[in-house]
Amino acid sequence: MKIYSHENLSLHRPLPYFSYGKMHEPLEIPERMVEMLKAPAALGLEVTNAKEVGMGPILAVHDFGYVEFLKHGYDEWMAVEEDLGDQVQTGIFVPYDNPGLGIMAKAAKYQADDSAPISEHSWISIYWSAQTALNAAEALLNDDSDSSNDTDVQLCFSRPPGHHARKSAAGGFCYLNNAAIIAEHLRQKYAKIAIIDTDMHHGQGIQEIFYDRSDVLYTSVHGDTVNFYPGVTGHEFERGTGEGEGYNVNFPMPHGTDEEGFFEYVDKSIDTIKTFDPDVIVHVLGFDVYKDDPEARCKVSTEGFKILAQKMKALNKPLIVLVEGGYYIQKLNDNLQAFLSGLIEKKS
Ligand SMILES: [Zn+2]
């Protein structure tokens, strides 16, 4: 197994923000990385420093203007004579096109909600989060061994996370859609990619990007999105369109679902993958399904993450795990250790 990270993933520090009628302390903070990096160290697992792959795979998924906004938005924001605050965030959300005259107009177009502000070092972390994920994809692309027997497992730290990022909009702590970027990148060698998302929230960005395609399956287990983020997608009836019909499979869980219930939905999601029979599996892993997480609407235990890892490994396909959500910092180390122990254990 290989684990990838990069020191730049810790640079992005969002500031407190106003949302749902009150101020919020950011949950997606650099301290998460400090805790999570303790897990491989405790298990004696090596973490490889990610190398730069470049912008090409990012621009294969995201609109150029949007990526330019992420890259230069902070500088443009700070260059405005009036003090607009220390991070790019307007509270103006206009998803349709506008002429983009001024950074405020661009922010209105490219930020989908309150929870993806851009602060001083955000772009560096956003870029390196995608680069880190791409290292795992590159390893598979450059592997000459017979991939049909390849059971290699790779895990990438993915901060900031990506599954809520749309083609041209940031939201839900996400900016670049790391899972979508590597799935698209892997398509140059592999015909069928499956993305399984077990984060607490529905990954509407991944759904949007592959909604009309049959070569990338997206299946997600998440909390019912009625009055729960992202609030507007994640329903069972969203099954894809055109050629993509049937290749988008959502399993919304009723809030309060226990661990047994969670795994019933995960097993259904896994059955969908088995039917699809992909060449590679990308797993979006969120520790926000943990019972004490502030975002949790279900009750997964620490031990549950080991079981989850065993289930993913048992699919016996090349597997890339992206570590995305999870905000109960005190248990991130334990929970990741549990997951890793499920990945590394030898078959009995
Ligand atoms: Zn989440």
Image (spheres, rainbow, N blue to C red):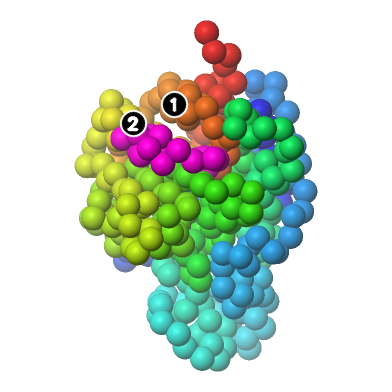
Residue that badge 2 annotates: 267
Which residues make up the magenta segment?
Answer: 268-284
Choose top left, top right, bottom left or bottom right for residue 221: top left
Crowd rating for badge 2 (residues with CA inside 10 Å; few <14, some 14–19, many 20+) = some
Left/right placement of residue 137 relative to residue 217 reads right
User: Could you tell me residue 40's position as x and y percent?
Assistant: 65, 28
Q: Is residue 283 left or right of residue 182?
A: left
How many numbered marks appear?
A: 2
**Is label 1's Cβ within 8 Å of ligand 1?**
no
Q: Are marks 2 and 1 in contact (CB under 8 Å)?
A: yes
- In front of the other: 9 or 273: 273
Whether residue 23 is visible here, answered yes or no, is no
Q: Residue at x 33, y 48 (%)?
A: 249
Considering only vertical position in the picture, is 169 above or below 137? below
In the picture, residue 140 is in which quadrant? top right
Residue 136 numbered tag: none
Placement of 309 over or under 210, stated as above or below: above
Residue 204: say if magenta.
Answer: no
Residue sitting at 62 percent across and 86 percent down?
Answer: 80
Mark 2 CB near ligand 1 (8 Å cut): no
Residue type at the position of mark 1: Lys
Q: Residue at x 65, y 20 (%)?
A: 43
Q: Which residue is mark 1?
A: 311
Q: Position of residue 68 (x, y in %)?
A: 64, 75
Left or right: residue 307 compared with residue 261: right
For badge 2, the amino acid type reads Asp
